[in-house]
Each structure stands twice: as structure tokens, then as C-alpha cells.
């Protein structure tokens, strides 16, 4: 769903490997990028552990935002 989708594809496998090396009781994921949240949910489902999703406001740093002027863009970053 975002520009991190290719990067996030490998996360469930990485999370599973980390869990086998040092087990944890939950996964904490933060987004955007929202692909990271989707990857965390997939890993949590595979491992049978809960996922806590920190869904941040994409107001600043939103790659898909369209600012009316360059001044507006600078002002909100």
C-alpha cells in the first residue's frame, strides 16, 4: 500500500527468526509506512502472538501529500 511494500515483504520471516532466537510475547509495529503494520500482523498471526499497532498521523512527512506551494511543504516538515 506504500513505497515500503517491497522492503516489508521480508519482515514476517525476520520477525519469526528473531522470535525463535529470543521469544517475545507481542509485536510492536509503527506506521507509516503502513506496509510495516501489515507485515507485523502477518507475523503475529503466524506466531500466534498479539500485535500492538502504533498508527501515527501521516500529516508531516507524508510522501503522498500535495502542498499548494513549496512554502507550505517546508512549513509542515
Image (spheres, grey):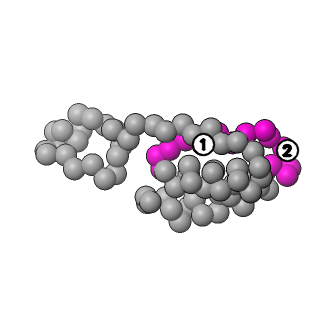
Residue at 80 percent across and 40 percent down: it is 24
The boundaries of the magenta stretch are: 19-33
Rounded to the nearest whole Å, what is the CA distance between mark 1 and mark 2? 18 Å
Residue 14 in sight in this render: no
Residue placed furthest toward the left? 69
Which residue corresponds to mark 2?
22
Mark 2 packing: few (<14 Cα in 10 Å), some, or many (20+)? few
Residue at 43 percent across and 58 percent down: it is 2
Does the magenta run of residues contain 50? no
Measured from the top left, where is residue 43 in percent x and y? Answer: 69, 54
In-front residue for pair 49/63? 49
In-front residue for pair 45/31? 45
Q: Which mark is residue 73?
A: none
Measured from the top left, where is residue 1 in percent x and y? Answer: 44, 60
Mark 1 packing: few (<14 Cα in 10 Å), some, or many (20+)? some
Q: Is residue 8 left or right of residue 1?
A: right
Who comes first in sequence, dot 1 or dot 2? 2
In-front residue for pair 20/52? 52
Residue 42 in sight in this render: yes
Measured from the top left, where is residue 40 in percent x and y? Answer: 63, 50
Quadrant showing the C terminus: top left
Which residue corresponds to mark 1?
29
Residue at 85 percent across and 52 percent down: it is 20
Kindly state the secondary structure of the residue where label 1 is placed.
strand
Does the magenta run of residues contain 26? yes
Q: Nearer the viewer, mark 1 or mark 2?
A: 1
Q: Is residue 40 left or right of residue 74?
A: right
Amino acid at each position: 500500500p506504500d513505497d515500503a511494500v517491497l522492503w516489508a515483504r521480508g519482515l514476517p520471516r525476520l520477525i519469526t527468526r528473531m522470535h525463535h532466537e529470543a521469544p517475545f510475547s507481542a509485536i510492536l509495529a509503527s506506521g507509516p509506512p503502513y506496509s510495516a503494520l501489515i507485515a507485523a500482523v502477518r507475523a503475529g498471526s503466524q506466531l500466534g502472538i498479539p500485535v500492538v499497532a502504533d498508527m501515527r498521523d501521516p500529516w508531516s512527512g507524508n510522501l503522498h501529500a500535495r502542498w499548494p506551494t513549496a512554502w507550505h511543504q517546508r512549513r509542515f516538515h
